[in-house]
Image: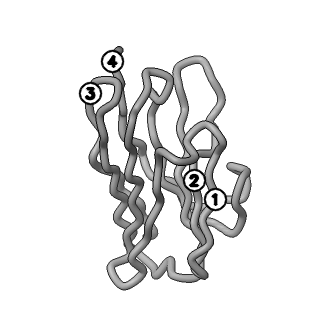
């Protein structure tokens, strides 16, 4: 059974850094697009970052220059390094695997999410 499990969330202060990790199991995701999305209370789930098997990376404008996505296909993991965190980054962060980049509908597999809270 395919499974994605996120870890690394927590409560931090504005300006701090945090690293999220996602461990995939049940199948090899080497050919998939791996992405990170987030959902704040009362808002829709939104794209944060994605990375193709080729190494191409994509970022939402709101996180560009602050967040970095990486993947290790040998270990079936994907990470999101977040720096200079802002209160507006507070959300539940989800790891996903699929074939597209920007849309939630392009992703087939989802993790359960990890909470990131940034205090001002």
Disc 1 vs disc 3: which is toward the camera? 1
For the rendered model, the colour scheme is one colour
Q: Name the residue under label 1.
A: 58
Sequence order check: which comes first, mark 1 or mark 4? 1
- SS category of the residue bearing label 4: strand
Residue 14, label in figure: none
Q: Earlier in the sequence, mark 3 or mark 4?
A: 3
Give 28 or 62, whichever is nearer the viewer: 62
Q: In which quarter of the image is residue 120?
A: top left
Q: In this view, does 39 lie above or below 94?
A: above
Q: Distance between the residues labelled 2 and 3?
A: 21 Å
Which secondary structure, mark 2? strand
Real-space Cα separation, disc 3 to disc 4, in angstroms: 7 Å
At label 4, counting other C-alpha atoms closer than 10 Å, the crowd grade (few under 14, some 14-19, many 20 or more) is some
| In front of the other: 27 or 106 | 106
Which mark, by number, is residue 11? Answer: 3
Q: Name the residue under label 4.
A: 119
* Residue appearing at x 39%, y 60% in the figure: 79
Q: How crowded is mark 3: few (under 14 residues within 10 Å), some or many (20 or more)?
A: few
In the picture as drawn, the residue positioned furthest to the bottom comes out as 74
Q: Is residue 90 above or below residue 42?
A: below
Give the left or right position of residue 11, taking residue 5 as reference: left
At 72% from the left edge and 53% from the top edge, which residue is drawn? 102
- Kindly check if marks 1 and 3 are in contact, taking CB atoms under 8 A apart as contact: no
The answer to the question of whether label 2 and label 3 lie on touching residues, with beta carbons closer than 8 A, is no
Sequence-wise first label, 1 or 3: 3
Q: Are marks 3 and 4 in contact (CB under 8 Å)?
A: yes
Which numbered disc flags the more N-terminal residue, 2 or 3?
A: 3
Residue 53 point in image, percent of width and height = 57, 79
The residues tagged by marks 1 and 3 sit, at their Cα atoms, a distance apart of 26 Å
Residue carrying label 2: 49
Element carrying mark 3: strand
């Amino acid at each position: 059974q395919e499974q994605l499990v996120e870890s690394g969330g927590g409560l931090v202060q504005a300006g701090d850094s945090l690293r999220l990790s996602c461990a995939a199991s049940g199948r090899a995701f080497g050919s998939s697009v791996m992405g990170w999305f987030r959902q704040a209370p009362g808002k829709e789930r939104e794209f944060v970052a994605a990375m193709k098997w080729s190494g191409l990376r994509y970022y939402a404008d709101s996180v560009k220059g602050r967040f970095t996505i990486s993947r290790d296909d040998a270990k079936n993991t994907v990470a999101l390094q977040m720096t200079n965190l802002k209160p507006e980054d507070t959300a539940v962060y989800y790891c996903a695997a699929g074939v597209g980049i920007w849309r939630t509908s392009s992703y087939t597999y989802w993790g359960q999410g990890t909470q990131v809270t940034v205090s001002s």
